[in-house]
Image (spheres, helix red, strand yellow):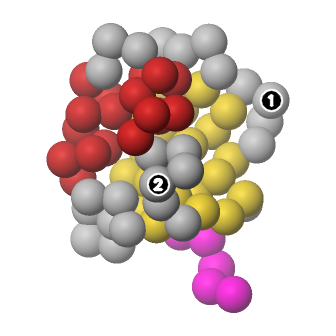
Amino acid sequence: MEKPTYLERHKVNSSNIVSIGHDTKKKILQVEFKNGNVYEYRNVPEDVYLDLMGAESVGSYFNANIRMDYPYSKL
């Protein structure tokens, strides 16, 4: 298994998510949850990341458009 990529994550205003980071070249999205878990989602394009960061509800956007739509692993 490939080593996880370190990404700078940015804090978000969400009841369930603490911070989010994205690597545009590798299309990796990292999501840190308030329970302490961090997940890495693969093949996430930059426009999806930007939409997530700009969403009125980050958690709702994440659940509707990312959570089950991209391959992921727990870090």
Q: Earlier in the sequence, mark 1 or mark 2?
A: 1
Q: Could you tell me which quadrant the N terminus lies in?
A: bottom right
Residue 75 highlighted magenta (yes or no): no
Q: Which residue is mark 1?
A: 35
Q: Could you tell me which quadrant the C terminus lies in?
A: bottom right
Q: Quadrant of residue 14?
A: top right
Q: Position of residue 45 (x, y in %)?
A: 26, 58
Q: Vertically, is 8 above or below 24? A: above
Q: Position of residue 64 (x, y in %)?
A: 45, 34
Q: Residue furthest right?
A: 35
* Magenta-drawn segment: 1-8
> Residue drawn at (37%, 68%), measured in percent from left and top?
43
> Residue drawn at (68%, 47%), measured in percent from left and top?
38
Mark 2 residue crowding within 10 angstroms, few (<14) / some (14–19) / many (20+): some
Callout 2 amino acid:
Asp
Any part of residue 8 in sight = no
